[in-house]
Image (cartoon, rainbow, N blue to C red):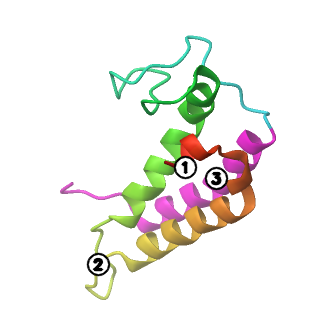
Amino acid sequence: SENPLPIGLSMRALCHTACYADLIADKKVLPPVSGCQHSDSVAPGYTYEGLSVEESLEMAIWRPLLDGLATGMCSSASSISGGVGCLVQRGSAMALRAILLRHGGVFSVSQWS
């Protein structure tokens, strides 16, 4: 976008993401009551196609977090020195790596695919 988020805000979001991932993995965050769907990306419960109902409900919670980190890795925010937002990109990659190392076992084979 023309006005990317400030770096400080992005870094705080990464810290909150790590806390939220722990809550999801500990089953302290429940899937949407409305269920899951894979046709409208802006509607609640958006998830991946081809999963069982239980897996889809789990991914409805994980998907915004994982998609947000993927977006951070593609950030084009410029740094003060004029380079592309390396801090956001690296921070997002490190956060995703840490989440997968710590909680990767909660995903089924279908969810990994």
Distance from disc 2 to disc 3, alpha carbons, whole Å, reads 23 Å
Relative to residue 9, is residue 78 drawn left or right? left
Q: Residue at point 66% right, 66% down?
A: 98
- In the orientation shown, which residue stands out farthest toward the top? 34
Residue 111: image x %, image y %? 56, 42
Label 1: element kind:
helix
Residue 32 x/y as whole percent: 60, 19
Q: Which residue is mark 1?
A: 112
Q: Farthest residue in the left direction?
A: 2
Residue 44 in percent (x, y) is at 47, 21
Which residue lies at the image location 72% right of the left edge and 52% below the top edge? 19
Q: Amino acid at mark 2?
A: Val
As for residue 90 lying within the magenta part, the answer is no
Spatial CA distance of label 1 from label 3 is 23 Å
Highlighted range, magenta:
1-26
- Is 29 or 10 nearer to us in this picture? 29
The mark nearer the N terminus, 1 or 2, is 2
Residue 97 pos. (x, y %): 59, 67
The residue pinned by badge 2 equals 84
